[in-house]
Image (spheres, grey):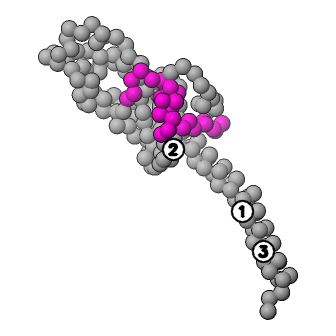
Amino acid sequence: MVSILSVVVIILGIVTGLIITVSVIRPLQVARKARKIAEIQRDFRRQREQLEAKFIDEVSVSGKPRGLRWSDVAFDDDIVFARNRKTGDLRALVAIEVCFEAIEGGGMEEVEAVSNVRAATAEFFYDGARWCTRGRVFFNLGPKGLIRYLHADLESVECGPASGMSSQATESSAP
């Protein structure tokens, strides 16, 4: 028959193992994940020029907005990283300024506002292996404003010190 002392020793061993797991292994996992995110963020910066070109290619053939052609896109230097709350997928959000010109016969030739510069946010995503774009654009919102607007779906991701950016991606400011 097992003595009460043996049961107590077994329970204490299990509790000690759980404490060690929580206090040692979990912080190591968190640190490893932070290093991985910083590496993915650096990869975006390295590939940014090619990604921006791909973005322009995608939006140029999208046919949106109807009757307009993308004539110029100016990308801001700053990048705001966000994570999809449901899937954990990483996003890079970049403020852009867009200029359009009317397509002949597209019904927009007489609209004066066509030539107005439009503020928007370009979205890039990490597919688990590389950065990509589908040419997704959010008009009238800056990156931080987009995260606030889609707060149920997106959350800011701090930029780690290894990524070369300040960690102010979560500060509130005007879009």
Q: What residue appears at the point 27 percent right and 24 percent down from the top-left corner? A: 65
Q: Give the SS element for disc 1.
A: helix
For badge 3, the amino acid type reads Ile
How crowded is the residue under tag 1: few (<14 C-alpha within 10 Å), some, or many (20+)? few
Which of these two is toward me, 11 or 30? 11
Which of these two is toward me, 55 or 91? 91
Measure the C-alpha gap from mark 1 to mark 2: 26 Å
- Residue 155, horizontal then vertical, whole percent: 54, 38
Tell me the magenta residue range. Answer: 137-163
| Above-or-below relation of 55 to 68 | below
- What residue is pinned by disc 3? 11
Q: What residue appears at the point 82 percent right and 77 percent down from the top-left corner? A: 8
- What residue is pinned by disc 1? 21
For badge 2, the amino acid type reads Arg
For badge 1, the amino acid type reads Thr
Q: Which disc number belongs to residue 70? A: none
Horizontally, is 155 left or right of 130 in the view?
right
How crowded is the residue under tag 2: few (<14 C-alpha within 10 Å), some, or many (20+)? some
Which callout, 1 or 2, points to the residue nearer the camera?
2
Q: Give the SS element for disc 2.
A: loop
Res 43 visible = no
Measure the C-alpha gap from mark 3 to mark 2: 37 Å
- What residue is pinned by disc 2? 85
Q: Give the SS element for disc 3.
A: helix
Question: Can you tell which quarter of the image residue 73 is in?
Answer: top left
Tell me the quarter of the image containing the N terminus.
bottom right
Measure the C-alpha gap from mark 1 to mark 3: 15 Å
Q: Earlier in the sequence, mark 3 or mark 2?
A: 3
